[in-house]
Amino acid sequence: MQLPSELDDLYQDIILDHYRSPRHQGLLHDPDLRGEGFNPFCGDQVVLTLGLDGAGRIAEVGFEGQGCSISQASASMLTGHLEGKTLEEAEALVRTFKGVMQGGEFTPEQEDDLGDIVALEGVKRFPIRIKCALLGWTTLQDAISAYRKTRD
């Protein structure tokens, strides 16, 4: 059994790995959805692009950004869990993550499903960093909302 400080060290390593080697980095050339997020408090930026398949599932994901390790690692972790999901499933993922950042807890089942994303749970102990962790997630939600408005 790991001690809490060892677990914190592991989570810090996971966050730094995603920051140094972001997954799905680079924007799609012809995305179905595009979102741009900016945190005016610290200057973090994220641009998220998604490509959908014929069934409406997320087939491709790309992002670019600049900012702190938390914002960029969080965006990397998010993009790693989007492929194959419907927009509704992606929105449910956003709601779950936002709920945890606002004081909730991941269930054991969610911990199993979310992998590296669980490493971000400790961010909620630092309220000023929560917006950093949420930037990619709110950008995704905004992109989905904008996409739906164009489809109505």
Image (tube, grey):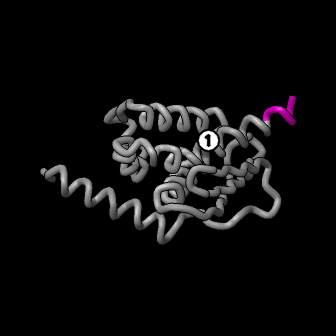
Q: Position of residue 128 (x, y in %)?
A: 45, 45
Identify which residue is drawn at 74% across, 48% down: 53
Q: Is residue 93 left or right of residue 35?
A: left
Q: Is residue 123 above or below residue 107?
A: below
Residues rendered magenta in the picture: 148-152
Q: Is residue 102 above or below residue 45?
A: above
Identify which residue is drawn at 48% across, 38% down: 97
How many neighbours does mark 1 have within 10 angstroms: few (below 14), some (14-19), or many (20 or more)? many
Which residue in the rendered view is the most extreme toward the bottom? Answer: 20
Front-lying residue, 94 or 5: 5
Q: Which residue is mark 1?
A: 138
Front-lying residue, 60 or 5: 5
Q: Secondary structure at mark 1?
A: helix
Secondary structure predominantly adopted by residues drawn in magenta: helix
Q: Position of residue 55 (x, y in %)?
A: 74, 40
Find out whether residue 65 is within the magenta segment. Answer: no
Q: Quadrant of residue 113?
A: top left
